[in-house]
Each structure stands twice: as C-alpha cells, then as structure tokens.
Amino acid sequence: MAKIGIMGGTFDPIHNGHLLLGRQAYQEYELDEIWFMPSGNPPHKKDHPITDAAVRCDMIQLAIKGEPAFRLSEFEVRRPGNTYTAETLQLLAEEYPQHTFFFIVGADSIYEIEQWNRPELVMARTVLLVAEREYEQARCSLTEQIQYLKHRYQADIRLLHCQEVDISSNELRRMESRRKKIYKYVPEAVARYIEARGLYQEEQDEQES
C-alpha cells in the first residue's frame, strides 16, 4: 500500500508554488509519491480559454524533472467531458484500491468545498491536506472552518505548514501576455517552453480587441 498525494488543478502554467506545496506534503506526511494531475475540463474554469492538455502536461514534465517522488498523472485529461473531483476520487479508488490518497488543496478550497459537485463524497474518499494561506472571502478562521467540516462530514482534514508563494497561474499568464519575465516564479525549463511557444500572448490580444 502506498500513500499518494494528489496535486490537482489546471497547471496553466505550473509554477514554483505548486512544487513547494508538493514537496511539503511529501515530507510532512511521509508520502510515497506526489501525482500532479492536470484537470481536463474543469466546469468552474470558464473565465478564460484553457491551454491544450498536452501542452500543460509538457510543462509539468519539465517542472518535475529531477524530483524522483513526483509523477505526472494524465488520469483526468484522458477523460471526456467535465471533470469533477468526486468522480475522479471514485475512479482512483477503483483503479488503485491498494493506495491511500491525500488530496492537496489551498485554504480557498476548504471554504468553497461545499459548492463542489458532491462534496460529501470528496471528503469521504480522501484525506484533505490544506495549505494555510490568505483567503479574502473567509467568513471564519481556517481552524473553525476545518472543525465545521470535520463535524458535519466526518472529514479527515490536516494542515500543511508550507511557506506561501505570492503568485498564481492567472497572474503569470497576465505577466507573460505583457512580455514580463516570469523566470522568478517557474522552473527555467518551463519559462523557456512558454517563451518558445508564445503561450498566453492571445490574452493580451483579447484585452486590446
């Protein structure tokens, strides 16, 4: 039996904060592997076009090279239609019954999780590892929110004590569209890949049109 950490998200693009979070989860909870699992068609990400899955997978492969415990998982991008965490966790349990899965999320997800598709199944099927970070819409402290979810859903939620990286994929796309260097925030191989392919330039074109 292996303890597998799941890093989900669009990874559009993957950045140093994702890697830092994966390393912390791996070390703090003595996990065997961290699977970076880019989403296929997340229903909540309709505010901008999502980069082709193959390109996002390429960037993840470049980012995790040299990290022996990190793996790219195409489990979600191979599935057609919208991808929901509850369904993903059910399918993972069926395909890998020998593993225990730890789902790595930010504090924002803990406040918003009741708005997810079938949140009760998400919390029943995985251990949630939560990175402490600021969330402007918070109605209560993170500790209070965790206690509420534990009581209502019998959820297994544990804190990740990780240094916060003040950057997001959305900000990186905006920076790249304005020709600003992003080498400080992503692995060098990823930054070179983005530049070579001219990724995210269309966002600036859309703003100017």
Image (cartoon, rainbow, N blue to C red):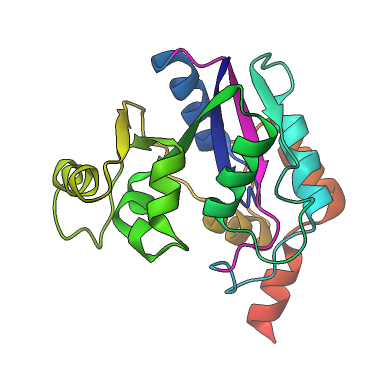
Percent of width and height locating residue 183 = 64, 37
Q: Is residue 98 left or right of residue 63?
A: left
Q: Quadrant of residue 190?
A: top right
Quarter of the figure with the N terminus: top right
| Rendered residue at 38%/53% (across/down) | 120
In the drawing, does residue 163 fall left or right of residue 103? left
Q: Residue at x 85, y 52 (%)?
A: 197
Q: Position of residue 101 (x, y in %)?
A: 52, 30
Q: Quadrant of the C terminus?
A: bottom right
- Compared to residue 65, the image places residue 181 above or below, namely below
Magenta segment boundaries in residue numbering:
30-43
Q: Residue at x 59, y 56 (%)?
A: 175
Total number of numbered labels? 0
**Where 23 falls versus 148 (above or below)?**
above
Q: Nearer the viewer, residue 182 or 120?
A: 120
Position in image of residue 146 (x %, y %) = 22, 43
Residue 186 shows up from this direction: no
Query: Residue 196, percent across and down?
Result: 86, 47
Judge from the rendering whether residue 162 lies leftward or rightward of residue 68; answer left or right. left
- Residue in view at x 39 percent, y 45 percent: 123
Magenta residue check for 150: no
Compared with residue 84, is residue 158 higher up or lower down, i.e. above or below? above
Whether residue 6 is visible here, answered yes or no, is yes
**141 w.r.t. 128: above or below:** below
Q: Nearer the viewer, residue 52 or 13?
A: 52
